[in-house]
Image (tube, rainbow, N blue to C red):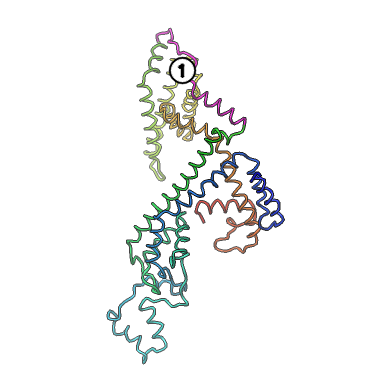
Amino acid sequence: MDPWNWVDFIIVFAALWPQFLGSQTSRRMTNRNPGMKLVVNSLCASIPQILNVLALLLLTIFNILVVNNFKGKLYSCNNSRRAARAHHAPRMWSNLTTTEQAWFDPLVAQAYAAFSQQHTLGRSSETLTSHMFCGFDNVLSGRLTFFEISTTEDWVTLMLASVDATEIDMHPIANYRESWTLFSIAFIFFGSSFIIQLFIGVVIENFNKMKEKLDGTYLLSGSQREWLMISTAIFNLGPMYERKTPRSRLRKLYFRVTQSPTLETITMGCILLNTFIMALTYFGQENLYCGVINYLSYFFGIVFTIEAAIKIIGLGRYYWKESWNIFDFSVALGSLIGNLVRVARLIKLIQTAPSLRQLVNTLLITLPSLVSIDGLLSLIFFIYAALGVQLFAKVKMGDLVTPTTNFQSIGIAMSTLICSATGER
């Protein structure tokens, strides 16, 4: 009665066909991992709503508009010797000179007349045409093309092709209709970004609903639940100690300075200025310019060191009871080492900004929940990599199949799939 048992049975039975479904046995890990199972169930529950999202009128309007304007027009010459002629604008017969018109005189060049007339008018021979994309010859091929460019794959190439397109069976002309660039940008903005965000939103909504039904901690194991409870309690707790005013007059003065918001304001300003100055460096800078940048960086290092010293004198042993103070001291001490530690001064803003600190704490709390999602994603990549090795390991090297992008080994196959998923070639 358990559908996951049916999945295990089908996969075990299909494993007898090793060339295709043998690699699917790794999917059984999903049944063993409750977190992965929840992610898969969320994706399955999202399918009906995702279909409604994909059926939005927006994509249909884009598709119909493009098919009506570009059906049969996205063709180009595939002959390398004559490919450059595709960008030459055709000329009317009345605009040709007498010598050029004489080329079409049967008495002068009867054998060349038909061929030269094709190219003078900008027409393309049927034997010298090739399709650039899946095409916009009909609505189905247009939908497939839109799906490809919705991933931002070669959308610039399509934009340039639509700008150069002229008429049916005519050579493209460079920048023939530049206004179509706005259409391509509009589709990337609305059709790609907007639709993908809707897709992600639907999945996340169903994911959260299933988590609410399962008390919100179904993705976590027992130890992860305990860690989450302890971490949440620690982040919500305030300091359990009281900062006592020192008796010494000097320490009392420093203590008042540490409690003053002016010190935090000055420190934050120095952090921002230090970051801005470090961003001013560039290749080829003069020695004087480089020296000024270094001296300013050392100056801010001294300022942060003085700040740490004031807090140590004013707070005493209580200074070392806060983890952020220890971090500040490490940054101030390490600023004398190199630029790597100096960049870490920007992290000091987290201590002075409560909203940033809350964001960091939330990120730390959600890390265990991301383990299952990352595991499922890695499992999917591994399955397709294993299939690719079984099916395409002996494909001949070429322009796209290179020593770094192929399916000859599981490692390179994983790298190839990651490049494909990110839109890289």
Height in image: 376 above or below 157?
Answer: above
Question: Pointer 1: what residue?
Answer: 312
Q: Seen from this angle, which residue lies furthest top?
A: 247
Residue closer to the observer: 126 or 278: 126
Q: Which residues are magenta?
A: 222-249
Confirm whether the magenta stretch covers residue 137: no
Q: How many marks?
A: 1
Residue closer to the observer: 60 or 256: 60
Within 10 angstroms of label 1, few (less than 14), some, or many (20 or more) residues? many
Q: Quadrant of residue 149?
A: bottom left
Residue 30 is situated, as x and y percent measured from the top left of the image, at: 63, 44
Q: Quadrant of residue 291?
A: top left
* Left or right of residue 108, residue 425 in this image: right
Q: Residue at x 40, y 43 (%)?
A: 282
Confirm whether the magenta stretch covers residue 240: yes
Q: Seen from this angle, which residue lies furthest bottom?
A: 107
**Element at label 1:** helix
Residue 267 is situated, as x and y percent measured from the top left of the image, at: 38, 26
Residue closer to the observer: 204 or 179: 204
Name the quarter where the N terminus is drawn.
top right
Q: Seen from this angle, which residue lies furthest left?
A: 94
* Left or right of residue 90, residue 223 in this image: right
Of the residues shown, which amino acid type is indicated by label 1?
Ile
Residue 289 is situated, as x and y percent measured from the top left of the image, at: 37, 39
Q: Seen from this angle, which residue lies furthest front?
A: 1
Q: Residue at x 71, y 53 (%)?
A: 13
Height in image: 151 above or below 1?
Answer: below
Q: Residue at x 35, y 61 (%)?
A: 180
Residue 389 is situated, as x and y percent measured from the top left of the image, at: 64, 56
Height in image: 42 above or below 149?
Answer: above
Height in image: 104 above or below 24?
Answer: below
